[in-house]
Amino acid sequence: MFLVYIDELAKLLESHGIIIVKLFADDVKVYLQIVNVSDTVMLQGALDLIVEWASTWQLQLSVSKCNMLTIDHVPFDVKYSVYDTVLP
């Protein structure tokens, strides 16, 4: 039954421009190449969409397990958040 939930989330993210999503059990990894400021807005929007989706299905995200991984140098100093908590 959980796969039904997760499949919908992947489709929602794709409809918002996030095309690289990895799903495994109850874990979700979202990937986005940040080239300009609009990409940072898109990534935060994807995080907000995940929060909204979880709320709709009465699921709670474990913010303490959420992290950002930056590969290479990002020319923007951006803080991403989930439930108003800045991600490490």
Image (tube, grey):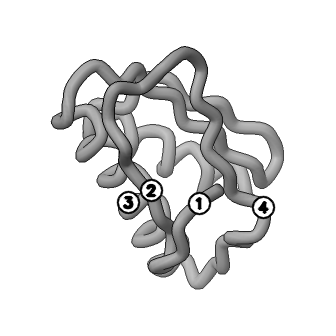
Dot 1 or dot 2, earlier in sequence: 2
CB under 8 Å between callouts 1 and 2? yes
Q: Is residue 43 above or below residue 14?
A: below
| In the image, farthest residue toward the bottom | 58
Disc assigned to residue 60: none
Q: Residue at x 37, y 32 (%)?
A: 18
Residue carrying label 4: 65
- Mark 3–mark 1 Cα distance, whole angstroms, equals 16 Å
- Mark 4–mark 1 Cα distance, whole angstroms, equals 9 Å
Q: Residue at x 50, y 23 (%)?
A: 20
Residue carrying label 2: 80
Residue type indicated by callout 3: Leu
For the residue pair 77 and 1, the one nearer the viewer reads as 77
Residue type indicated by callout 2: Tyr
- Mark 2–mark 4 Cα distance, whole angstroms, equals 14 Å
Residue carrying label 3: 49
Give the image location of residue 39, x and y in percent. 26, 32
User: Which secondary structure, mark 2?
Assistant: loop
